Amino acid sequence: MHRYCIPLVLLLFAGSISAVLAQSATPGGDGASAAPPQGLDSATLFRGRTPVSLGPRTLQDAAELWSHTGDAPVLVGTNGVVMYAYGESHPVVTCAPLRVCVIELMAHEHITNMAIGDSVRWLIEAAQSGAGADVTPVVITKPTQADLVTNLAITTDAGRVYYLTLRSDTRKYVPEIGFYDPEQIVIRLGEQRAIADAKAAARADTVVDDLGAVDPATLDFRFTCKADNRAARRWLPIRVFAGGGHTYLQMPDTLAYSDAPALFNLIGTGRRAQTELINSRLLHGYYVIDGLPSRFELLVGAGSAARTVTCAHD
């Protein structure tokens, strides 16, 4: 009886090992004929979605949709390319025997390594389009027979890892797929907006005032200014002009090294003239007065130490 025990144990052990090896051939446990992940098959997507132009605007819209909803759509281009969102999907590339399929990665990166599960029945080759700084890496793959399923991993010097499932079909295939990175697009758009905002702010800081639709030929330069004493001459405007409901006083550079005068509207004449503080602001060496006063003064100090410049419209 004991002589049958050892062969029986060996038989059971061999059967267990065979089962484990069969299940470990692919994640699905069915070897080369395992079913690929569902829902992102390139051929199905190609036939089921309306083609769009894969221009920058389309990719920006897709990236902004991702930033708001977390959903990065797979795009089908009018040029026949199926575009997957990098890091947001698991592409399943459908190819056919005797046909090459192109996997286009993202621009400005280089392939550092490729690994394919079935290197016997699938042929792969790295290539590139463009040159110099505009180079775009591509991977060309071709199955030798139908009904194959394997996986492909590609690493690049940009730190990206592309993981794809490859399958072969006798009747349907997609000649090219590509990728877009919604996160990088959103970051780039944010940087572009920040630069544009900075330029707009810089322009606002250098423009004294926006005259809008005012014709420069209609600006009124008929103003005369007079310093009441020698000490007040440092606040004597270089020129005064009005337009678009504002009055502008171009001040000398010495203003930066002295006290800024206050501006008062002069109502009436002589000793009975009344003063009224004018709403104004100093921008880049120009006083901008809201309004069109016919007579006003620039005042520094008070009492006997007061220094005054009086300006009047001629």
Image (cartoon, rainbow, N blue to C red):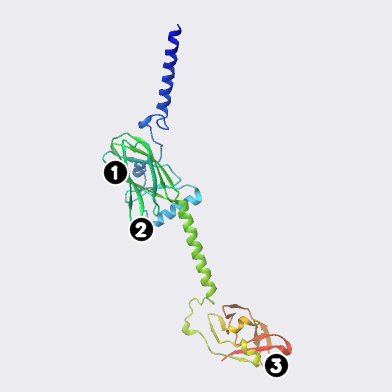
Please tell me whether mark 1 sits on a helix, a strand or a loop: loop
- On screen, residue 123 above or below 12: below
Tell which circle, 3 or 2, labels the residue nearer the N-terminal end: 2
Quadrant of the image occupied by residue 262: bottom right
- On screen, residue 68 above or below 253: above
- Distance in Å between CA atoms under marks 3 and 2: 79 Å
Other residues around mark 3 within 10 Å, as few (<14) / some (14–19) / many (≥20):
few
What kind of residue is marked 3? Arg
Q: What's the mark number on residue 271?
A: 3
Task: Using the image as rendered, state which of residue 300 and residue 166 is in the foreground.
Answer: 166
Determine whether label 3 and label 2 are within 8 Å by CB: no
Quadrant into which the N terminus falls? top left
- On screen, residue 173 above or below 221: above
Identify residue for label 1: 100
Task: Using the image as rendered, state which of residue 112 and residue 20 is in the foreground.
Answer: 112
Task: Using the image as rendered, state which of residue 63 and residue 168 is in the foreground.
Answer: 168
Is residue 52 shown to the viewer in this render? Answer: no
Identify residue for label 2: 132
